[in-house]
Amino acid sequence: MNIIESYMEFLYLCESDVYTLFYFWSDRKLKDWNISRIEYGKEWCQDALDFAYRMVKTGLMDIDYSDNGPTSEEMKKIFQDLSVSSPDIAEGGAIWSAYQFFLTKKGEDFVREWKHSEDNELFERKLTEMLDDHDVGFDKRSFVPVNFQ
């Protein structure tokens, strides 16, 4: 599965509810793992964190938060907390579970238009252009580097 498909699956999922980044891991990827013990490696954590950062920066998604949403400083702290917390341990898993992502109005419109058009190539280009316009394109990564042991 390519990165665009992972992004599309999570965006589609968030059409109807809020979700943690744990759902960024698609069912197809899970089938490749030994289900008896799932471990969230640093690469997966970095991919999920980069996804969240890109979606928030473009305004397609936000974090379900008390009051009127997280301030810029609170958002920095959220990403920092995620980056230093391994979801494989209880405390880290609690942090990764605490933050619920949802589509903004802009995100809802984008996904609705994407699904209605049934033109994945066009929307892959639109998403790529949008990410590039916000300086968070697929050619960049580790916006907030994962830094846990």
Image: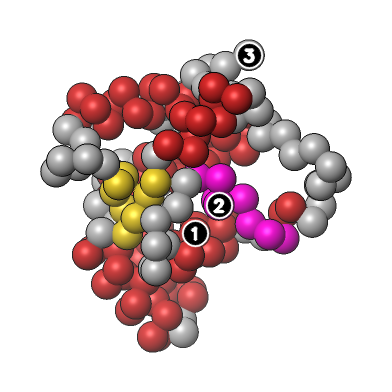
Q: Amino acid at mark 2?
A: Tyr
65 up-or-down from 112: above or below:
above
Q: Which residue is mark 2?
A: 23
Tell me the residue that label 3 is attached to: 149
Assess whether residue 93 is covered by the magenta stretch: no
Please, what secondary structure does the residue beneath circle 1 have? helix
The answer to whether residue 140 shows anywhere in this view is no
Q: Amino acid at mark 3?
A: Gln
Question: Which residue bears the numbered disc 1?
Answer: 10
Q: Quadrant of the N terminus?
A: bottom right
Q: Is residue 134 left or right of residue 115?
A: left
**Crowding at label 2, few (<14), some or many (≥20) Cα neighbours within 10 Å?**
some
Is the Cβ of the residue at disc 1 closer than 8 Å to that at disc 2?
yes
Instruction: Looking at the picture, tell me which residue is in the foreground, 72 or 89.
Output: 89
State the residue at coordinates (33%, 79%). Answer: 113
Residue 32 x, y percent position in the rendering: 81, 52
Q: How is the image coloured?
A: secondary structure
Residue 77 location (% of width, % of height): 31, 23
Q: Position of residue 134 (x, y in %)?
A: 27, 46
Q: CA distance from mark 3 to mark 2?
A: 23 Å
Examine the residues drawn in magenta and state their main secondary structure. Answer: helix
Label 1 CA crowd tier, 10 Å (few <14, some 14–19, many 20+): many
Q: Earlier in the sequence, mark 1 or mark 3?
A: 1
Q: Earlier in the sequence, mark 1 or mark 2?
A: 1
Name the residue located 54 percent from the left edge and 40 percent from the top edge. 47
Q: Mark 1 touching mark 3, by CB under 8 A?
A: no
Label 1 to label 3, Cα distance in Å?
A: 27 Å
Q: Which residues are magenta?
A: 21-28
